[in-house]
C-alpha cells in the first residue's frame, strides 16, 4: 500500500479557461511556472494582472483579446489540431518538460460539457502525471491503487468512482466494507475522517478523492 502525504512542491500550475480561483491561490505557488490555456491567460491578466509563463492552444481567443499585446512576453505554444482540447495540450507540454506534479485550476465552470471532458482527459493522462485539482478550498486527486492518507480527524472526504471501483476503507465514520461504487449508481459522498491514518483499499477500478486543500503543498506518493 502506498502512502500519500502533503509535503511536496508542485512542478507547475495548469490553468484552464473555466472558473479560475482567487488570486491568493497563485500567490501560494508563485514559484511554479503557469501553463495557461489561451482564454485562461486572458482571464488571469484581466482579473489579476498576472502573466502566464506559457500560453497554449490554437490561440484564436488569445489573438482576439485586447490583452494579447501585453502577454506576448510569454512562451506561446500554438497547436492548431482539434483532436485534443487545451487541457490535454497543456498536459502533453508539461510531460515534455518533465513537470509531473501539477496543480490544475479553472477546470470547471462555464459549460458543463467542458468539465466532464476535462475529467475524461484526466483519466486518460492521469497515470503518467500526478494531477491535483483545486477548486473552492478542496483538492481532487485520482487514486488508481490502495493508499494510506495523512488527513485530519473531522475532515470531510468524498470518493467518486471513475467509473467503477471496489473499495474498503479504514478510519472513516461511514466505512466501506469491500463495497462496489459505480458512476450513476453509488458513490461515497461527504464522509468524515474518524481516525488517522485513513486507508483506502482498492481491489479494482479507480476513484477520485476529494479532500481539504493544503496549499502550497502538493501530494507526495511514497511506497
Image (cartoon, rainbow, N blue to C red):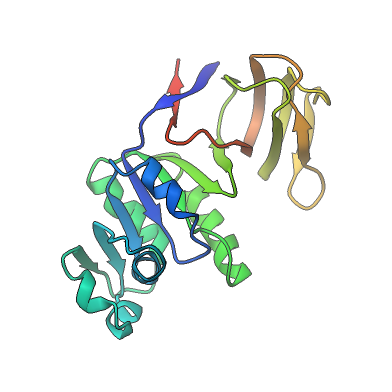
Residue 137 image-quadrant placement: top right
The reply, left or right, for residue 155 in relation to residue 129 is: right
Name the quadrant of the N terminus.
top right
The reply, left or right, for residue 221 in relation to residue 179 is: left
List x then y, in percent, for residue 133. Answer: 51, 46
List x then y, in percent, for residue 209. Answer: 62, 37
Asked whether 147 or 179 is in front, the reply is: 147
Q: Please report the residue visible at 76 percent of the width from the left and 22 percent of the height from the top.
A: 172
Q: Please report the residue visible at 57 percent of the width from the left and 19 percent of the height from the top.
A: 150
The reply, left or right, for residue 192 in relation to residue 129 is: right
Asked whether 29 or 10 is in front, the reply is: 29
List x then y, in percent, for residue 179. Answer: 80, 29
List x then y, in percent, for residue 14. Answer: 38, 52
- Compared with residue 167, is residue 117 higher up or lower down, i.e. above or below? below
- Compared with residue 67, is residue 147 higher up or lower down, i.e. above or below? above
Residue 164 visible in the shown view: no
- Compared with residue 6, is residue 96 higher up or lower down, i.e. above or below? below
Q: How many marks?
A: 0
Q: Please report the residue visible at 23 percent of the width from the left and 48 percent of the height from the top.
A: 96
Q: Please report the residue visible at 29 percent of the width from the left and 49 percent of the height from the top.
A: 94
Residue 156 image-quadrant placement: top right
Residue 105 visible in the shown view: yes
Amino acid at each position: 500500500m502506498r502512502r500519500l502525504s502533503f509535503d511536496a512542491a508542485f512542478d507547475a500550475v495548469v490553468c484552464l479557461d473555466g472558473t479560475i480561483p482567487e488570486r491568493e491561490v497563485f500567490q501560494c505557488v508563485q514559484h511554479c511556472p503557469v501553463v495557461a490555456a489561451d482564454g485562461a491567460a486572458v482571464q488571469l491578466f484581466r482579473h489579476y494582472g498576472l502573466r502566464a509563463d506559457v500560453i497554449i492552444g490554437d490561440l484564436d481567443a488569445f489573438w482576439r483579446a485586447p490583452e494579447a499585446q501585453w502577454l506576448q512576453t510569454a512562451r506561446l505554444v500554438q497547436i492548431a489540431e482539434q483532436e485534443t482540447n487545451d487541457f490535454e495540450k497543456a498536459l502533453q507540454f508539461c510531460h515534455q518538460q518533465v513537470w509531473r506534479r501539477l496543480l490544475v485550476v479553472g477546470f470547471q465552470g462555464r459549460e458543463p460539457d467542458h468539465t466532464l471532458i476535462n475529467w475524461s482527459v484526466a483519466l486518460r493522462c492521469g497515470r503518467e502525471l500526478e494531477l491535483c485539482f483545486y477548486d473552492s478550498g478542496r483538492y481532487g486527486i485520482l487514486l488508481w491503487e490502495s493508499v494510506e492518507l495523512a488527513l485530519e480527524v473531522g475532515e470531510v472526504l468524498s470518493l467518486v468512482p471513475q467509473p467503477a471501483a471496489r473499495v474498503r476503507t479504514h478510519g472513516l465514520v461511514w466505512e466501506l466494507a469491500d463495497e462496489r461504487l459505480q458512476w450513476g449508481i453509488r458513490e461515497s459522498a461527504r464522509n468524515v475522517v474518524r481516525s488517522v491514518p485513513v486507508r483506502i483499499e482498492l481491489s479494482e477500478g479507480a476513484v477520485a478523492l476529494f479532500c481539504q486543500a493544503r496549499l502550497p503543498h502538493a501530494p507526495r506518493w511514497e511506497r
